[in-house]
């Protein structure tokens, strides 16, 4: 179109960022990542299988508790069954099921965070498209929030869907009135470790992605941080300083310690019980916040020099 055409008018309005810019970025990135066949299969079938396995484990545990209660009630006589069943069926079942379900989900979340989070910033840096992003009325916050929401969507499918399915199954199978309200605190506590894992792994994955320009390098960097922190925590906490609080160097260990504390359960398989439970819960919480701040800090530091149109 000729510049002197009468229909051509230069735009002289104010560039104001949309409040939904981060959601638009997240939606675009989710659709782009789902083009990857491996990731699409993983996020489609793995959460379904996790939910099914969680419901089956809950059903088996619930049935065993019911059988135990009925045997105890039968031994007491005809006056005891109702009260005994109502007393035994509690939020303990939710805690016991989460004991078996959450550790493998946490390991799977590390893999998902690596492969879903690696291309989020690295591909933009490789294509030199950050300047194109910020040539539009988009703030740094919108960009960071959109990328994080993308990864949180995939992590939430693995970490939050199974506890929700377990809670709904508990409400459906229980024959005690008020189960949904009585077990709500336990259900809320079961979601906290998943939310923390989304924060930590999400921030570390996009932080690692912002440091490199290739997806495979971002994957290796993220796995390197996770594995190095774990081995370093084991080395320092036992042979060197012999202080269990140093286990919190590893973010996955800190999340597991918070999980054990919130669910009030024993964790035999993760590591030696005495050494693991000696880790202070407050130190574990501090580790989670520090790792999250480190991941977001690296990301903000990498993109803060990109100019934004105002």
Image (cartoon, rainbow, N blue to C red):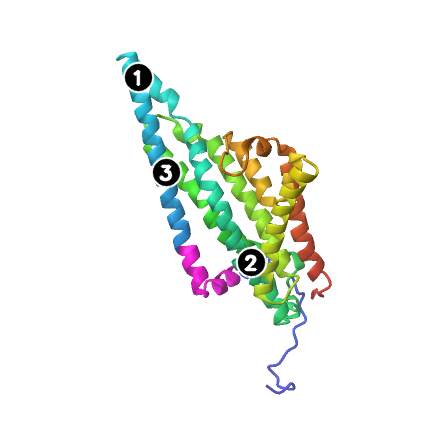
Residue at (30%, 12%) from the top-left corner?
76
Q: Which residue is tagged 3?
A: 57
Give how far across and how far down residue 95 sits, in percent. 45, 32
Counting residues from the start of the chain, the first of labels 1 and 3 encountered is 3
Residue at point 37% right, 34% down? 170
Q: Which mark's residue is nearer the viewer, 3 or 2?
A: 3
For label 2, count other residues whose C-alpha is less than 10 Å away and answer few (under 14), some (14-19) or many (20+). Answer: many
Residue 247, image x, y percentages: 63, 39
C-alpha distance separating marks 2 and 1 = 53 Å
The prevailing secondary structure element of the residues shown in magenta is helix
Give how far across and how far down residue 92 sits, in percent. Answer: 43, 28
Q: Earlier in the sequence, mark 3 or mark 2?
A: 3
Using the rendered image of the protein, determine whether residue 81 is visible from the camera's viewpoint. no
Badge 1 crowding class, 10 Å Cα cut-off, few under 14, some 14 to 19, many 20 or more, is: some
- Was residue 27 drawn as part of the magenta stretch in this picture? yes
Q: Residue placed farthest to the left in the image? A: 78
Q: Which quarter of the rendering shows the N terminus?
A: bottom right
- Magenta range: 26-44
Q: Quadrant of residue 26?
A: bottom right
The answer to whether the residues at label 1 and label 3 have Cβ atoms under 8 Å apart is no
Horizontal side of residue 150 vs 232, given as left or right: left
Q: Which residue is mark 2?
A: 117
Give yes or no for residue 57 being in the magenta stretch. no
Q: Which residue is mark 1?
A: 73
In the rendered view, does 92 fall on the left or right side of 126? left
Of residues 183 and 215, the one nearer the viewer is 215
Q: 294 or 226, which lies in front?
A: 226
Q: Residue at x 68, y 50 (%)?
A: 294
Element marked by disc 1: helix
- Mark 2, secondary structure of its residue: helix
């Amino acid at each position: 179109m000729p510049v002197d055409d009468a229909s051509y008018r230069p735009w002289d309005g104010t560039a104001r960022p949309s409040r939904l810019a981060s959601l638009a970025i997240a939606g675009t990135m989710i659709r782009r990542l789902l083009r990857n066949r491996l990731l699409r299969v993983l996020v489609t079938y793995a959460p379904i299988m996790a939910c099914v396995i969680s419901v089956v484990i809950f059903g088996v545990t619930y049935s065993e508790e019911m059988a135990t209660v009925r045997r105890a009630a039968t031994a007491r006589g005809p006056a005891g069954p109702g009260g005994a069943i109502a007393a035994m069926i509690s939020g303990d079942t939710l805690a016991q099921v989460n004991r078996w379900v959450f550790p493998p989900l946490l390991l799977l979340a590390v893999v998902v965070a690596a492969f879903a989070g690696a291309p989020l910033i690295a591909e933009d840096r490789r294509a030199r498209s950050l300047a194109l992003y910020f040539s539009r009325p988009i703030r740094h916050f919108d960009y960071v929030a959109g990328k994080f929401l993308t990864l949180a969507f995939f992590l939430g499918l693995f970490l939050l869907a199974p506890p929700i399915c377990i809670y709904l199954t508990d409400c459906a199978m229980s024959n005690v009135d008020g189960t949904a309200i009585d077990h709500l605190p336990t259900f809320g506590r079961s979601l906290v470790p998943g939310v923390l894992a989304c924060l930590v792994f999400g921030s570390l994955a996009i932080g690692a992605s912002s440091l490199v320009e290739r997806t495979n390098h971002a994957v290796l960097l993220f796995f390197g941080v996770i594995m190095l922190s774990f081995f370093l925590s084991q080395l320092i906490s036992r042979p060197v300083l012999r202080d269990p609080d140093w286990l919190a160097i590893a973010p996955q260990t800190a999340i597991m310690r918070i999980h054990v504390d919130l669910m009030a359960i024993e964790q035999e398989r993760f590591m030696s019980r005495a050494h693991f439970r000696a880790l202070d819960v407050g130190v574990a919480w501090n580790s989670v916040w520090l790792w999250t701040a480190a991941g977001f800090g690296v990301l903000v530091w990498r993109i803060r020099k990109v100019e934004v149109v105002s």
